[in-house]
Image (spheres, grey):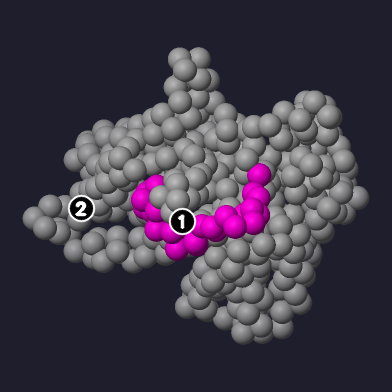
Amino acid sequence: FGSSVGVLSAILLSCAMVQSRNVQYVLMMLARTLQQCHRQTLPPLCQAMAKDLGFGIAEKGSLMGAVAVGYLLTQIPGGLMADVLGAKPTITLAIAGSTALMVATSAASSFEMLWLCIAIMGGMQGPLFPTSSVYLSRWSPPDERAKAASMLDVGVSVGSILIVPIASFLETLLGWRNTYLVVAAVSAAYVLAFVVLGAESPATCKRISDEERQFLQSVVIQKKKPAAGEASVSVIGVLFHPAVLTVFFAHLAFNYGFYFLSNWMPEYFSSVFGMDSLQSSTFVSCVSAANMVAVLTINPLVDHMMQQRQFTLLGRRRVFTCVGCFVAVVALVPVYRLNALGPIGTTALFAVGNVGFALQTWGFKANYLDVTVDFTGLVSGVGNTVGTVSSMLGPLITGRILAGDTAFGMSSWTVALLLVGVLSAVSALLFRLFSEAEPVEAGIKAKMA
């Protein structure tokens, strides 16, 4: 626990030497890293847990889905909590609650208790994406929103990369129960650091220069209560605004395609090239790494070039989303027809497709911070729920398509990849036509007037 506090403090203090808002960006990245660690501690420990508690393969599958059950139910309520009560207390409650459930999981004495702990843990984590969006919307200037929003995805990637080998090592050394306790201790250290260093907004931050505070207050639109006699904007009006619905569909298409790669690449290498999971793991890891490299290098470079050429904020959002969708379509749709390229060529195509998904994170995902100022948490919660449903239904749809050798007169893999391409293409078209980079409340109020 002490070592964790020291490491976290070193990371955050190094950021504080640059700008205070960078501390807040890193805090949100670490929150998502820990969320992913909590979720992904299960897979490498599941075999040991099954042996200890005496359950089989069917129960393992149920256990893997338990997190999603809780996660799906609490995203919208969590977003509402952030809008009403504030982002910092909601995030603190979510991480602390998930940490407590890690401790409870370590003490589970039956499969039923284990499943319940993991499902409730998922419920505690549900608010984190929408609440993080609210938090970042109060700290990030318009030109930094894409970078700030991408920190959430970077955090997920870092957690995914770190937790599997670490949890596997700790399990052999300490056992699965103590492994959960170690992860919980690190999480508790984060909660302490967040309580001390986190701030709801620049106005309430004690560790910020007057110059940076004044700058942020001048460029970041803060949520305000309606003036006396001023009509308030309805939630329904915001949620069903074309610009907001466009973001929801982009999230649906993104999750369908992104998790298609995550879930089905090993199966593709197995069925097409006859490779087992160990043989294909290097190729799959390369595809995952391409996404993270693009987020950290290509996206900032492209964004800088567009700013140098005076692209508007809306123009940059549309370029990242539409070009990202186009890259995904061009790379993924012909994969099966080009399988003569072998595993290396296929990996290259999958990697380019994943770069396309990385580009989109600086487009529609950053747009969550643009399109509303009064309902950021609710809009992010609804959008992420739509995306979660897509990522849950996607494997079922793909599985049905792949159940036969052919579909609609084409190879089943071709049809499955084509569906990813169609959703991406429609997403690009809708985003090009209906997206906005200003809060929709202003337009709604103008029509009301």
Residue 393: image quadrant is bottom left
Where is residue 26 shown, x and y percent of the image?
A: 71, 40
Image quadrant occupied by the N terminus = bottom right
> Cα distance, mark 2 to mark 1?
36 Å
- Label 1 CA crowd tier, 10 Å (few <14, some 14–19, many 20+): many
Q: Where 300 falls versus 9 (above or below)?
A: above
User: Residue at position x 55%, y 58% from top?
Assistant: 232
User: Residue at position x 50%, y 20% from top?
Assistant: 307
Q: Where 247 falls versus 240 (above or below)?
A: above
| Residue 126 in view, yes or no | no
Give the residue pinned by disc 1: 238
Give the residue pinned by disc 2: 415
User: Residue at position x 25%, y 61% from top?
Assistant: 402
Question: Which residue is the extreme one toward the right?
Answer: 2
Quick check: marks 2 and 1 in contact, CB under 8 Å? no
The amino acid at mark 1 is Val
Where is residue 439 shown, x and y percent of the image?
A: 51, 44
Magenta-span inclusion, residue 161: no
User: Residue at position x 82%, y 42% from top?
Assistant: 205
The amino acid at mark 2 is Val
Relative horizontal placement of residue 331, taking residue 30 as reference (left or right) = left
Residue 86: image quadrant is bottom right
Q: Which residues are magenta?
A: 222-250
| Residue 116 in view, yes or no | yes
Report the number of discs: 2
Query: Which dot marks residue 3?
Result: none
Where is residue 250 shown, x and y percent of the image?
A: 38, 48
Relative horizontal placement of residue 28, taking residue 360 as reference (left or right) = right
Relative horizontal placement of residue 303, taking residue 202 as reference (left or right) = left
